Amino acid sequence: IAEVRNALQKVSDRERTYLHYRYGFVDNEVHTRKDAAYHFHLSTSRAKRLEEGALRNCRGNLPDNYFFPENSGNNIHFL
């Protein structure tokens, strides 16, 4: 978990806030991309680009044995 927190500190505030909300770090509820887009007043395509960029940036800050969700719907699998 410390590695994930460290990786999240190295992305932009906007990306970090989005990921926290999207994957339930804020309220322990994983939100759909559509819900996250609505919450942040984004189009779903903009939310997708933001999420993909944020995850790509996080991947670059984690050891190789960590992985992130790829088309996994509401499930997050990264530890």
Image (tube, helix red, strand yellow):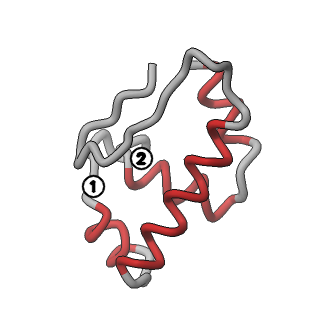
The picture places residue 7, in percent across and down from the top left corner, at 68, 35
Q: Quadrant of the N terminus?
A: top right
Tag 1 residue: 31
Q: Quadrant of the C terminus?
A: top left
Q: Residues within 10 Å of mark 1 (few under 14, many from 20)?
A: many
Q: Nearer the viewer, mark 2 or mark 1?
A: 1
| Number of numbered tags placed on the structure image | 2
Q: Residues within 10 Å of mark 2 (few under 14, many from 20)?
A: few
Q: Callout 2: helix, strand or loop?
A: loop
The residue that appears at 27% across and 68% down in the rendered structure is 35
As drawn, the label of residue 26 is 2
The residue that appears at 43% across and 67% down in the rendered structure is 48
Residue located farthest toward the right when viewing the structure as drawn = 10
In the image, taking residue 35 as reference, residue 16 lies left or right, namely: right
The picture places residue 72, in percent across and down from the top left corner, at 27, 43
The picture places residue 56, in percent across and down from the top left corner, at 61, 48
Give the amino acid at mark 2. Val
The picture places residue 5, in percent across and down from the top left corner, at 63, 30
Q: Callout 1: helix, strand or loop?
A: loop
Give the mark nearest the N terminus, 2 or 1.
2
In the image, taking residue 31 as reference, residue 14 lies left or right, namely: right
Give the amino acid at mark 1. His
In the image, taking residue 78 as reference, residue 28 lies left or right, namely: left
Residue 13 higher or lower than 2, as above or below: below
